[in-house]
Image (spheres, rainbow, N blue to C red):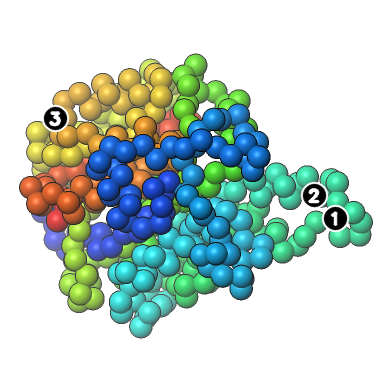
């Protein structure tokens, strides 16, 4: 699905964003860290996290009860807590007027689910004492849409509530899904983005996963959410137009050697839809996957001269939140550099399970 740049009636804009990242909670530490090229990776406390990684991109000092309080958080897992906190940040900073019509404000959240919760619950079912075996309050954490549902409940979002999952491309898929919902008249404003948690079980699974012989590097976690609406709605709510979404394209590839060609086709299509040329792109936020996939991405971007903003080397592999962090980095750059106003930004993603995607934005 794509949007033509010359069709104002169909254009959607990003009018707010929030992020929780290994730099900390909030946009400012993220923007300063990414734009300054400062790594957010830190040694892992092996006592708390018995994982096969020496470093990771953890949200510093993150504690659910400290940030959200004890009410309603007894059984909340880390993935849900990260999502709930980030949604709250976005609504606090940019949500003026949205509460007046909660049925028209919804959430599209990308996530991999909580591997830790799923495996812990399964273990308890096999080892717990009868007659109950498991804590039923923790069962919702095993369902992939738990972070989305809990975020909507806590922040009274009564519009569409959708969970998507697509590996490293998840953030772009969530933004595209939200765009379709808005154009279909199912909401007037949507929060769209993605969240990922760091956990022992995720780390162990990633350590033994097939990365094509490449070192996947440290893992990261966090969330990035974006307020998506029409330009008219943004102006009516007193919100800035931070970026206009010009379109997204996605394709599948059956083998690693064809990933670059699939991504190049996505880039060519999204530029053609926007009636733009490769040299019009001022900023590129690539996914920078390790090994052969990374080389495929480089080849697909070879004809795009824009400045590169690398996110993964600084915060680690955030999996589901990866592309959302890349989108946030583009917005951070647009907000910090006046020269990027009205310039194009491209975000790309390649997932090892066979999905590529490209999203084109006009900043400012």
Q: Residue 185 at x, y = what percent?
A: 32, 68
Q: Which of the numbered marks, if any, corresponds to residue 164?
A: none
Tell me: 251 left or right of 277: right
Kindly indicate whether the residue at mark 2 contacts the one at mark 1 (C-beta within 8 angstroms): yes
Local packing at callout 3 (Cα closer than 10 Å; few below 14, some 14-19, many 20+) is: some
Q: Position of residue 142 (x, y in %)?
A: 65, 53
Query: Whole-Å distance between the Cαs marked 2 and 3?
Result: 53 Å
Q: How many marks?
A: 3
Q: Nearer the viewer, residue 228 or 198?
A: 198
Q: Where is mark 1, residue-wise?
A: 133
Is the residue 187 above or below the residue 2 in the image? below
- For the residue labelled by badge 3, is the local secondary structure a helix, a strand or a loop? loop
Residue depicted at x 64% and y 43%:
48
The label number, if any, that marks residue 124 in the structure image: 2
Quarter of the figure that contains the C terminus = bottom left
Upstream in sequence: badge 2 or badge 3: 2
Residue 149 seen: no
Does residue 6 appear in this view?
yes
Q: Which of marks 1 and 3 precedes in the sequence?
A: 1
Q: Give the image quarter of residue 99.
A: bottom left
In this rendered view, identify the residue nearer to me: 36 or 100.
Answer: 36
User: Disc number at residue 305?
Assistant: 3
Distance from label 3 to label 1 (Cα)?
A: 58 Å
Q: Residue placed farthest to the right in the image?
A: 130
Task: Estimate how packed mark 2 is, as few (under 14), some (14 to 19) or many (20 or more) residues with alpha carbons within 10 Å.
Answer: some
The image shows residue 351, relative to residue 94, as above or below, that is: above
């Amino acid at each position: 699905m794509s949007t033509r740049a010359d069709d104002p009636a169909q254009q959607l804009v990003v009018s707010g964003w929030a992020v929780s990242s290994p730099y900390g909670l909030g946009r400012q530490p993220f923007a300063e860290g990414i734009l300054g090229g400062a790594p957010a990776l830190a040694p892992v406390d092996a006592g708390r996290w018995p994982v096969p990684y020496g470093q990771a991109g953890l949200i510093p000092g993150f504690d659910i009860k400290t940030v959200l309080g004890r009410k309603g958080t007894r059984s909340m897992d880390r993935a849900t807590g990260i999502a709930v906190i980030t949604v709250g940040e976005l609504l606090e900073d940019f949500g003026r007027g949205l509460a007046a019509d909660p049925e028209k404000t919804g959430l599209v959240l990308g996530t991999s689910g909580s591997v830790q919760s799923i495996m812990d619950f399964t273990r308890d079912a096999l080892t717990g004492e009868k007659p109950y075996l498991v804590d039923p309050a923790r069962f919702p954490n095993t369902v992939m849409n738990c972070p989305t549902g809990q975020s909507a409940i806590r922040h009274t979002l009564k519009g569409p509530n959708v969970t998507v999952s697509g590996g490293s491309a998840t953030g772009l898929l969530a933004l595209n899904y939200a765009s379709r919902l808005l154009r279909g008249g199912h909401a007037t404003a949507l929060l769209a983005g993605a969240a990922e948690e760091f956990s022992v079980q995720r780390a162990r699974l990633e350590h033994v996963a097939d990365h094509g012989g490449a070192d996947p590097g440290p893992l990261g976690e966090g969330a990035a959410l974006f307020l998506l609406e029409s330009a008219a709605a943004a102006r009516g709510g007193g919100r800035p137009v931070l970026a206009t979404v010009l379109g997204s394209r996605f394709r599948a590839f059956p083998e690693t050697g064809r990933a670059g060609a699939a991504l190049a086709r996505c880039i060519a299509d999204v530029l053609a839809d926007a009636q733009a040329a490769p040299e019009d792109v001022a900023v590129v936020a690539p996914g920078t996957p390790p090994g052969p996939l990374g080389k495929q991405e480089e080849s697909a971007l070879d004809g795009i001269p824009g400045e590169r903003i690398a996110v993964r080397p600084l915060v680690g592999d955030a999996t589901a939140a990866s592309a959302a962090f890349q989108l946030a980095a583009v917005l951070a750059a647009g907000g910090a550099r006046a020269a990027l106003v009205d310039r194009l930004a491209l975000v790309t993603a390649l997932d090892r399970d066979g999905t590529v995607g490209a999203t084109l934005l006009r900043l400012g």
